[in-house]
Image: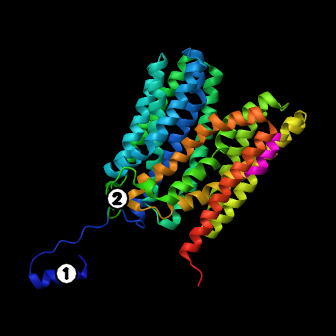
Amino acid sequence: MSPEAADRARRTDTPVAEPPPDPVAPDRPGSVLGGVRRVYAAQLVGAVVDGAVLATVVLYFGTRVGLSAGVVGPVLAAASGCALVAAAPLGALADTLGRRRAAVGYTASVGVFLLVYLVADGPWSYAVGAVGFVVAQTGLGATRHALVAAQVAPERRVAARALMHTLLNAGMGVGTVVGALVLALDTRAGYLALYGAGAAVVFGCAVLLLGLPRGLDAPGGLVRDTRVLAALGDARLVAVTALTALLQLCMPVLSVILPLWLATRTQAPVWVAAVALGLNTVLVLLTQRAWSARVVSDASAARSAWVAGAALSVACVLFGTAAFGGPVTAAATVLAGIVLLTLGEVAGGPPAWHLALKDAPVELQGRYQSVFGMAGSAARILGSALALPLVLFAGAVGWAALGVVLLAAAAGLGLLARRSRTVRNPPR
């Protein structure tokens, strides 16, 4: 009992209850550190499942189930579109229902839709599984980040986000290896075993998250705005999300655009695309946390954004020039471009996280994280719909144009950071 409570009890001769402690105390190592570690573990293990599924699911339904590209492509596009539309409502639901409960529910939903893959034998059942899986992942990703943000001090949110990003990349890398082994076996039983085991692992993650402190389901402060789309009213968040969507075009560049460019427009050996992806993964794992630790202010965020823009624009120029060399020259040029692309990815994330999320209201973390997460879905749509045709039809000029877009997006983040610095510290 506190001294004040004891004094009141002596004066009134009646017991006075101690005020309840905060449900989640940011600096209490016993509960919160364990809670954060649970989320980190779920992020890593879930990413392994995601990597294995994403590496195999298109080929499984294309070769074993017999769905054509004319079915698989539109379903994946529809899934990205649904995820984009559902992001903000899913974040609002997490804030309203409770972030712990929502994380458990979204995680269980991912497992359920993996089970749908086990029984899917046609276009409609595949569509249910694919769209449901992507939408559930959208809600889950934002809610995991919200859980971490609610348990760390605001100045540590960028570092925590960097660790989550690193765990995601590490898990996806391991999952891709698992998926490659299943692809090497190339049996229906192998694919089904993977999806069944993946569902079991995901349900285990749901149980892990269920053990988080119950206080995480309580609002972290006075709820000032209960609208579903409240976060969309934050002009800076919307601007940062839009610019981040352009910067994250480096994701479809790495996974879709560059492999097609190498296969159809250059003499680079067939193994270059795989090596490029592996090199990117390793470099991100080695550098992301260290780089993010340097982004602690608006000024450092602006500098990081400018580095990202310069690196990404030069990388695009190198990818374009790979079409004019022989096999060795093309391979060397592309791998040099991958180093710069990875530098742009590593340097571009922290300023966006700093500007979008450092000052996000704790009671609206689900909304803010989900709106910011829309950048990834938008980048995947823009990459397939606009950037890919631009590069394949315009060649090196198209790559240069894409580089200009990335440079402009990074410059926009840099200017926003400088403006934020001016607003926080006006000249005297």
Determine if residue 78 is in view. yes
Q: Amino acid at mark 2?
A: Asp
Q: Is residue 314 magenta?
A: yes
Q: Nearer the viewer, mark 2 or mark 1?
A: 2
Q: Give percent across and percent down for residue 290.
A: 65, 60
Q: Is residue 219 above or below residue 405?
A: below
The x and y percentages for residue 51 are: 58, 36
Q: Which residues are magenta?
A: 312-320
**Mark 2 vs mark 1: which is more N-terminal?**
1
Q: Hey, which residue is sitting farthest left in the picture?
A: 13
- For mark 1, give the secondary structure: helix
Q: Disc 2 marks which residue?
A: 225
Q: Say above or below: 186 vs 50.
A: above
Camera-side residue of 342 and 299? 299
Image height of 331 relative to 156, above or below: above
Work out whether 273 lies above or below 415: above
Q: Is residue 375 magenta?
A: no
